[in-house]
Image (cartoon, rainbow, N blue to C red):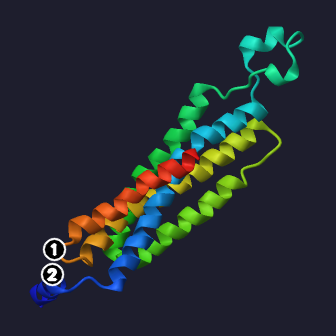
Amino acid sequence: MALKVLSALDAAKIQLYHFKAIIIAGMGLFTDAYDLFCIPPIMKLIGRIYYLDHHNSDKCSVMPKETQYKTTPTAVVSTLVSIALLGTAVGQLVFGRLGDRAGRRRVYGLSLGMMVLSSLACGFSICKTRNCVLVSLGFFRFLLGVGIGGDYPLSATIMSEFANKKTRGAFIAAVFSMQGLGILASSI
């Protein structure tokens, strides 16, 4: 029975469904890349608000206010970048296993929902104190990373399962090429 299904899939022609799947899975990877790579410019903005550069603190009285340079410490930037990557590793393990057990489509929707909610929550990580902002942003970026981690294996698996063997590689390449566009969009 399984061989009949696989041979029918391999003989199937390209349909509108395939392009919808490429767009949906591709947009997932677009937002993954965007969310992972948008944090450095955001940390520059946080630095301008919450940090004062100690190298210029003795000159503050003689320097005009607009030339005082504020920056986020490298350790803080590195932590907020890496915490999402840690969440990505956790998400790949958790959602990959859940996808095998509960169904890839259902778990893919859960993963995408988690990405949407946690990215919105990252946007609302506004507090009056620096520590509150950094802790809440770090927490929501970890959750975002978990959602992103679920998107990686599920996008590739879903796309490869529904493509015939002639177009499988091209379809998966089309899906993963959206990452480059996401990186460009985050820089813009």
Q: Residue at x 80, y 20 (%)?
A: 67
Numbered disc 2: secondary structure: helix
Q: Nearer the viewer, residue 7 or 133?
A: 7
Figure check: 79 above or below 14? above
Q: Nearer the viewer, residue 155 or 136?
A: 155
The three-letter code of the residue at mark 1 reads Lys
Question: Tags 2 and 1 in contact by the CB under 8 Å rule?
Answer: yes
Q: Is residue 121 left or right of residue 24?
A: right
Q: Position of residue 31 (x, y in %)?
A: 51, 59
What residue occupies the far right of the structure in this picture?
Answer: 61
Q: Is there any visible trace of residue 33 in the rendered image?
A: no
- For the N terminus, the quadrant is bottom left
Instruction: Provide the secondary structure element on which disc 1 rests.
Output: loop
Residue picked out by circle 2: 10
In the figure, residue 72 lies in which quadrant? top right
Residue at 32%, 73% (x, y): give it: 158
In the rendered structure, the answer to whether residue 12 lies left or right of residue 17 reads left
**Considering only vertical position in the picture, is 4 above or below 28?**
below
What type is the residue that disc 2 sits on?
Answer: Asp
